[in-house]
Image (spheres, rainbow, N blue to C red):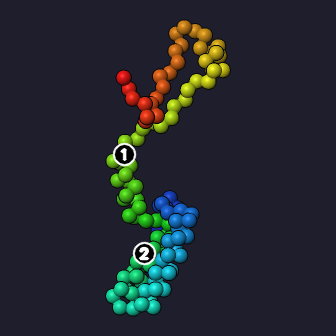
């Protein structure tokens, strides 16, 4: 039971948790009032949303996040460009020191 509430295992935070708890309670209430097979489905869905909000962990979100991270290659979006004061510093006075190549930010094309 302690594993369910382990903070290192949480991937649902803040408003997302609050909405899951509130939505789960609403769905469970509607399911109890409705009855029948539709009510049972609402009750089950609401229970899962309530559990997701209380525990702070969603296995489906974990699987989707990992799949997205594997399919999208990671790249650097920004690079440090030397400021004018850095270029004119004593560090760059030696002829052997060169400025670093800039890293493309995604919209440039390479020659």
Q: Residue at x 61, y 18 (%)?
A: 87
Left or right: 6 with respect to 83? left
Secondary structure beneath label 2: helix
Residue 13 image point, x, y percent = 53, 62
N-terminal of the pair, mark 1 or mark 2, is 2
* Other residues around mark 1 within 10 Å, as few (<14) / some (14–19) / many (≥20): few
Residue 44 image point, x, y percent = 39, 80
Q: Is residue 50 above or below residue 68?
A: below
Residue tagged 1? 72
Q: What is the quadrant of the C terminus in the image?
A: top left
Left or right: 58 with respect to 95? left
Q: Are marks 1 and 2 in contact (CB under 8 Å)?
A: no
Q: Residue at x 52, y 74 (%)?
A: 21
Closest to the observer: 63 or 34? 34
Q: Is residue 97 above or below residue 66?
A: above
Q: Quadrant of residue 64?
A: bottom left
* Other residues around mark 2 within 10 Å, as few (<14) / some (14–19) / many (≥20): some
Closest to the observer: 9 or 25? 25
Q: Is residue 9 above or below residue 44?
A: above
Disc count in the image? 2
- Nearest-to-viewer mark from 1 and 2: 1
Q: Residue at x 53, y 68 (%)?
A: 17
Secondary structure beneath label 1: loop
The answer to whether residue 57 is seen in the rendering is yes
The answer to whether residue 6 is seen in the rendering is no
Q: CA distance from mark 1 to mark 2?
A: 29 Å
Query: Any mark on residue 26, and which?
Result: none
The residue sitting at the top extreme is 95
Closest to the observer: 14 or 36? 36
Residue tagged 2? 48
């Amino acid at each position: 039971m302690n594993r369910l509430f382990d903070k290192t295992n949480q991937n649902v935070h803040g408003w997302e948790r609050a909405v899951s708890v509130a939505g789960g309670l609403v769905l469970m209430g509607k399911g109890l009032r409705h009855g029948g097979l539709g009510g049972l489905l609402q009750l089950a869905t609401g229970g899962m949303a309530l559990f997701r909000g209380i525990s702070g962990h969603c296995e489906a979100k974990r699987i989707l996040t990992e799949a997205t991270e594997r399919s999208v290659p990671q790249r650097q979006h920004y690079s440090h460009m030397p400021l004018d004061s850095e270029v004119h510093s004593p560090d760059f006075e030696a002829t052997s020191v060169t400025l670093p190549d800039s890293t493309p930010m995604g919209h440039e094309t390479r020659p």
